[in-house]
Each structure stands twice: as structure tokens, then as C-alpha cells.
Amino acid sequence: MNWREYWNQDTPIYVSDRHKTLHYQRIAADIAALVPSPQAHVLDHGCGEALSAGRVAARCGRLYLCDAAPLVRERLEARFRGNPKIEVLAPEAVEHLPDASLDLVVANSLLQYLSQDELRDLLRLWRRKLKPDGRLVLADVVPPDLGPAADAKALLAFGWKGGFAFRAILGLARTALSDYRKLRNELGLTTFAEPQMIELLRGEGFSAERRGKNIGHNQARMTFVATPVPPA
Ligand SMILES: C[S@@+](CC[C@H](N)C(=O)[O-])C[C@H]1O[C@@H](n2cnc3c(N)ncnc32)[C@H](O)[C@@H]1O
């Protein structure tokens, strides 16, 4: 199994329905806060089930939800069929969006499941699709020194605040025995040090900086904001 296949199923990542609901509420609130205008065209790449994407759509003109997993896309389509601002896309379909048409591209908690080559290809694609004054936000990026214990600690803190601490403890035990942990041990996660990410983005024609606050609950992970540098 690879990461793409892993995500095309129900996973034990969410320890309860409440965890999943609160997770997606928070992600949507954080993305909504980045939307630059009510007319903005926004792409959430690797969006997952995006349960609260309606909240982002309410703040922009058009919201593209892209996910590689067919099962996830089916669920997104069923959930947002009635929302005229939301369009669900397979990754290949992003290529067909008009060049220089997007105001904001967000990839939250995606990079760790991509190879370096896949990420480079995506950076080139996003660069082409972004307007000259658009913004790329790469969030929940895992630094090299961050192991499962730090993720567990962040989840417990989120569970404590969100009223699902007990389920978080049970869920952590379940995850430790799950395919997720097996895959994390076998395939690993793709990690980036802050200077490496800035360098990579520069090399692909962006100027970039790390944002003080990460999207979502895990503040040990990182968010980068990048803007296209005009060709010389
Ligand atoms: C950890 S989930 C993150 C979901 C959501 N962004 C969030 O923050 O909750 C990773 C998602 O990325 C999707 N994914 C993995 N590789 C992808 C790719 N190359 N293109 C688009 N989506 C991808 C998976 O199917 C999965 O739904």
C-alpha cells in the first residue's frame, strides 16, 4: 500500500466524529481567514473530506476542492452538490483550470505524503495557475525532527480542549496498531526543514516566508506563505 491508496478508505486518523468535526471546522476557519476577497478563486489541494468547506465557500467566489482519493471525491460531491460555488476536482483536472486564475492555493497536511518530485511538479502547476498577486499556502508541513510522539501530544491537547480527551487516548492506542503507523514506519513522511522549504519555493519562482502560526491544531508543524516572483 502507498499513501495515495491509504487515503482512499476510512482511516483511524480521527478518533471520533467529534474530533473529525472539530478538525475540519478549524481548518475551514483558518483557510477562510486567508481568503483575500469575496470574489476570490480558491483551490484547496489535498482537501480530504473538508466537512466545513461551505464556510470557506461563503467567503470566496469559487472554491475548488481537489483530492486524489476517488472515495473522498465521491463524498465531497455528495456533500456539496447543492453549493454552486464548490467544484470537486481530481488532481489531473487542476491542469485544466485557466492559467493565472487562482487567488489562493492551500495545501494543508499534504506535503508529507508526496515525494520530492511530486511536490516539485505541483509547485510548478500551482505557480502557473496562480494570479501574479495570488498566494500559495503550504501548511501543516512536518519538520524533520518531529516524531509521532509530538503529534500525539498535540492531539491530546486538542482532545482536552475539544472535549474528546478520553477518545483521543483510545484513538492513539488504535493508531499505534494501525496501517497508518505501519506505513509511517515503512514509507516515512516527507519532511522539510524551514530553510530547505524556503529554498525549494525560491527555486520554483516564489518568494516565501514561514508564518508564525500553523493552520490547524498542531503548532509544532509549519505553514509557509509564498507569492509568485514575476519573471525577470
Ligand atoms: C492528511 S489528509 C489532509 C486533508 C485536509 N487537507 C486536512 O487538512 O484535513 C491528506 C489528503 O491528501 C490527499 N492526497 C494525497 N496525495 C495527493 C495528491 N497527490 N493530490 C491530491 N490529494 C492528495 C489524500 O487523499 C488525503 O485526503
Image (cartoon, rainbow, N blue to C red):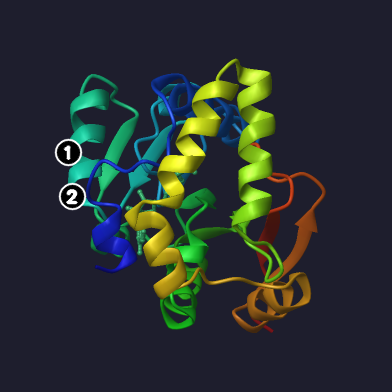
For image coordinates 48% across by 51% down, the residue present is 102
Task: Name the amino acid type tagged 1.
Answer: Glu
Which residue is labeled 2 in the image? 70
- Residue 80, image x, y percentages: 27, 25
Residue 37 visible in image: yes
Q: Residues within 10 Å of mark 2 (few under 14, many from 20)?
A: some
Quick one: 216 or 162, which is closer to the camera? 162
Q: Is mark 2 within 8 Å of ligand 1?
A: no
Which residue is labeled 1 in the image? 74
Q: Is mark 1 within 8 Å of ligand 1?
A: no
Q: Residues within 10 Å of mark 1 (few under 14, many from 20)?
A: few
Q: Which quadrant: the C terminus? A: bottom right
Quick one: 195 or 232, which is closer to the camera? 195
Quick one: 104 or 99, which is closer to the camera? 104
- Residue 90, image x, y percentages: 24, 54
Callout 1–callout 2 Cβ contact below 8 Å: yes
Task: Name the amino acid type tagged 2.
Answer: Pro
- Residue 69, image x, y percentages: 24, 52
Tell me where residue 208 sits by quadrant.
bottom right
- Residue 72, image x, y percentages: 25, 42
For image coordinates 26% across by 34% down, the residue present is 76
Residue 59 visible in image: no
Specify whether 12 is left or right of 210: left
Which numbered disc covers residue 161? Answer: none
Q: In the displayed image of the protein, which residue is found farthest to the top? A: 163
